[in-house]
């Protein structure tokens, strides 16, 4: 049965890959939302939960998570749970609904198993997002879920804290953890929030809000920060010192990159690849992201848990990230190219 479903996914993927990238993306999510989970072989076996990983007082059923950006509206949770993820990160979600950047904004490069996107925080808005998510609360919960929050496109960076605090306030009671996304390259000037002075001011506002919510709900929700792989060594060290000084619960390394490494794709596609703006994910991101992870591990010396994301598309890649200092890993593009069987392999081997 499992082999049949793997073959079925491969056939489904080959059909989808004949379509424009964002159309196939939307169709895949629609299928997962509307019964697609019944075609996914379950990997929810006792062995999946034998060795939970503890970070920030949370017990993760296994080390494998879904990265933010795939399920932005929180509509496909049964499918992710059926695949066996130990945790899923939903969003990025913004306070108000917004369409994101103009289309086309999603591009696949099959020969390199790469994706470039410039979605720009397309979001249904926090209220609709939480309405979607609340439908699954009463169902048996098989994994943890995090909520990745961002700011609206037209919110000035000086007021960005208002957007993040609003999302934090509204999402707090449903989240196992919350990730602050200040590293997407697809919203103008968003990454400037990573600059040390800006980051310190933003986190002070967010942490003050979190303390109030902790007292109100008698519940501590960990805060994670997702960073860019394109930081200078100096900025990276400053950021990590700020995160440790404020006792942020974990750092996620990394988001997508604006850098364009050498690729194996055909000359025609290579020209389009290097000219295309947006964040690069998938296999070509791996080395850059791994390098950032190693620097983080060296700077933090075990004082800040690290979650690895970026270019993980095999068991070997995940093992390299874990060996470099990560405790958990997240996948996105690897799932697009390899399907649910990748989740099964990672759970089995890690």
Image (spheres, grey):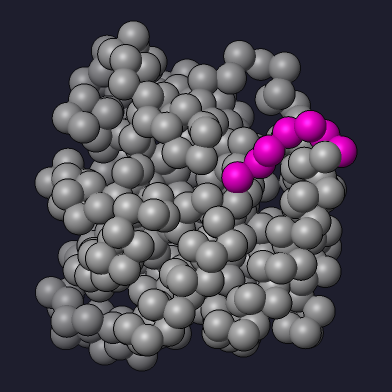
Q: Nearer the viewer, residue 145 or 32?
A: 145
The reply to whether the magenta stretch includes residue 221 is yes
Q: Quadrant of the N terminus?
A: top left
Q: Quadrant of the C terminus?
A: top left
The residue that appears at 63% across and 76% down in the rendered structure is 200
Q: Nearer the viewer, residue 233 or 103?
A: 233
Measuring from the top left, give residue 304's x and y in whole percent. 41, 55
Residue 150 visible in the displayed image: yes
Say above or below: 36 vs 288.
above
Q: Main secondary structure of the magenta part?
A: loop
Measuring from the top left, give residue 53's x and y in whole percent. 37, 31
The residue that appears at 55% across and 25% down in the rendered structure is 78
Left or right side of 175 for 115? left
Say above or below: 290 vs 276.
above
Residue 106 visible in the displayed image: no
Quadrant location of residue 311? bottom left
Q: Residue furthest top?
A: 46
The residue that appears at 33% across and 83% down in the rendered structure is 233
Q: Which residues are magenta?
A: 216-222
Measuring from the top left, give residue 123's x and y in whole percent. 70, 59
Say above or below: 17 vs 327.
below
Measuring from the top left, give residue 277's x and y in whole percent. 44, 85
Say above or below: 31 vs 206.
above
The reply to whether the magenta stretch includes residue 261 is no
The residue that appears at 67% across and 67% down in the rendered structure is 203
């Amino acid at each position: 049965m499992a082999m049949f479903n793997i073959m079925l996914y491969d056939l489904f993927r080959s059909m989808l890959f004949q379509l424009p990238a964002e159309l196939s993306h939307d169709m895949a999510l629609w299928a997962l939302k509307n019964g697609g989970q019944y075609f996914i072989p379950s990997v929810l076996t006792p062995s999946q939960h034998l060795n939970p990983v503890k970070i920030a007082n949370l017990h993760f059923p296994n080390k494998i998570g879904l990265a933010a950006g795939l399920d932005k509206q929180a509509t496909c949770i049964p499918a992710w749970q059926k695949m066996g993820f130990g945790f899923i990160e939903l969003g990025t979600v913004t306070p108000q609904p917004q369409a994101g950047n103009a289309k086309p904004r999603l591009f696949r490069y099959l020969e390199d198993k790469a994706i470039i996107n410039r979605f720009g925080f397309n979001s249904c808005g926090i209220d609709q997002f939480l309405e979607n998510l609340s439908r699954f609360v009463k169902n048996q919960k098989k994994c943890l879920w995090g909520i990745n929050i961002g700011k609206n496109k037209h919110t000035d960076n000086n007021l960005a804290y208002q957007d993040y605090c609003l999302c934090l306030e509204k999402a707090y009671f449903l989240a196992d953890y919350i990730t602050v996304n200040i590293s997407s390259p697809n919203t103008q000037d968003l990454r400037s929030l990573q600059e040390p002075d800006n980051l310190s001011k933003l986190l002070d506002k967010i942490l003050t809000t979190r303390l109030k919510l902790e007292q109100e709900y008698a519940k501590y929700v960990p805060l994670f920060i997702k960073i860019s792989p394109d930081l200078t060594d100096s900025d990276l060290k400053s950021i990590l010192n700020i995160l440790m000084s404020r006792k942020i619960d974990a750092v996620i390394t990394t988001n997508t990159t604006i850098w364009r490494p050498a690729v194996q794709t055909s000359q025609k596609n290579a020209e389009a690849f290097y000219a295309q703006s947006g964040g690069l994910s998938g296999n070509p991101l791996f080395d850059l992201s791994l390098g950032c992870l190693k620097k983080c591990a060296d700077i933090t010396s075990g004082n800040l848990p690290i979650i690895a994301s970026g270019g993980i598309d095999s068991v070997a890649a995940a093992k390299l990230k874990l060996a470099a200092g990560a405790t958990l890993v997240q996948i996105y593009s690897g799932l697009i190219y390899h399907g649910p069987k990748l989740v099964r392999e990672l759970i089995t081997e890690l």
